[in-house]
């Protein structure tokens, strides 16, 4: 149902599955995903919380919970949740973990930026770039924050790197 875009029906299906097995952490997790897509952030957080009670080491649930909390502007909680996702994505060496780790650091940086913790924002982008060194969005955003801090030479270097990486991924058409 979810893949067909029938989000309400998907939630109903997950609810039915949970009637049979209250301890189905995957049904709780995917119900949370559908709830986020419908903008039901409080409900999604509750689903993720229940899923995490059953499977504490689910980095995707921690990550998605952090995103939902961020949507509600509960930034300190979002940051803590993203920190948990990051802790779980720093050891295995797989593409999925690499992507979630980088995205978690980037979302953590956004929450910290809103909180005005600019030095911590730089650190978060540095960590994202340690995972995916060619991520032009991280380089660009890092440059903007460095500029806000008055560290202009570093800002220019970061933005130059962002442009270089962007053009590598999106080459200009030949005339």
Image (cartoon, helix red, strand yellow):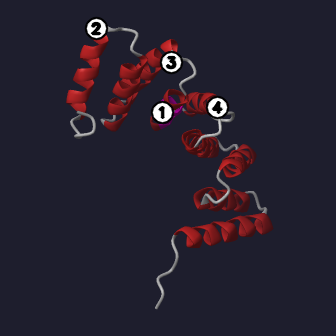
Q: Earlier in the sequence, mark 4 or mark 3?
A: 3
Question: In the image, residue 106 lies at what x, y percent?
Answer: 60, 46
Element marked by disc 3: helix
The residue lying toward the viewer, choosing from 94 and 115, is 94
Q: Which mark is residue 52?
A: 3
Question: Magenta segment: does it hold 69?
Answer: yes
Q: Is residue 82 above or below residue 49?
A: below
The residue lying toward the viewer, choosing from 92 and 100, is 92
Q: CA distance from mark 4 to mark 3?
A: 14 Å
Element marked by disc 1: helix
- The magenta span reads 63-70
Question: In the image, residue 5 lies at what x, y percent?
Answer: 23, 40
Element marked by disc 2: helix
The residue carrying pointer 3 sits among few (fewer than 14), some (14 to 19) or many (20 or more) residues within 10 Å by Cα, namely many
Q: Earlier in the sequence, mark 1 or mark 2?
A: 2
The residue lying toward the viewer, choosing from 136 and 91, is 91
Task: Single out the mark in the foreground, 4 or 3.
Answer: 3
Q: Earlier in the sequence, mark 3 or mark 1?
A: 3
Residue beneath disc 1: 64
Label 2 near label 3: C-beta < 8 Å? no
Question: In the image, residue 71 lies at what x, y percent?
Answer: 45, 37
Question: In the image, residue 27 lies at what x, y percent?
Answer: 36, 21
Secondary structure, magenta segment, majority class: helix
Residue beneath disc 4: 83
Q: Is residue 78 above or below residue 47?
A: below
Q: CA distance from mark 3 to mark 2?
A: 19 Å
The residue carrying pointer 2 sits among few (fewer than 14), some (14 to 19) or many (20 or more) residues within 10 Å by Cα, namely few
Residue beneath disc 2: 20
The residue lying toward the viewer, choosing from 28 and 115, is 28
């Amino acid at each position: 149902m979810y893949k067909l875009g029938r989000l309400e029906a998907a939630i109903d299906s997950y609810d039915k599955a949970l009637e049979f097995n209250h301890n189905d952490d995957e049904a709780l997790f995917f119900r949370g995903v559908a709830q986020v897509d419908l903008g039901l952030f409080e409900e999604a957080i509750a689903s993720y919380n229940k899923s995490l009670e059953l499977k504490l080491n689910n980095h995707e649930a921690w990550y998605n919970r952090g995103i939902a909390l961020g949507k509600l502007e509960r930034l300190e909680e979002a940051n803590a949740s993203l920190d948990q996702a990051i802790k779980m994505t720093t050891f295995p060496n797989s593409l999925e973990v690499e992507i979630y780790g980088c995205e978690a650091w980037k979302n953590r940086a956004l929450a910290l930026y809103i909180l005005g913790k600019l030095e911590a924002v730089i650190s978060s982008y540095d960590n994202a770039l340690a995972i995916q060194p060619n991520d032009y969005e991280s380089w660009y955003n890092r440059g903007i924050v460095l500029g806000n801090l008055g560290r202009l030479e570093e800002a220019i270097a970061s933005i130059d790197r962002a442009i270089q990486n962007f053009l590598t991924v999106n080459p200009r058409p030949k005339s």
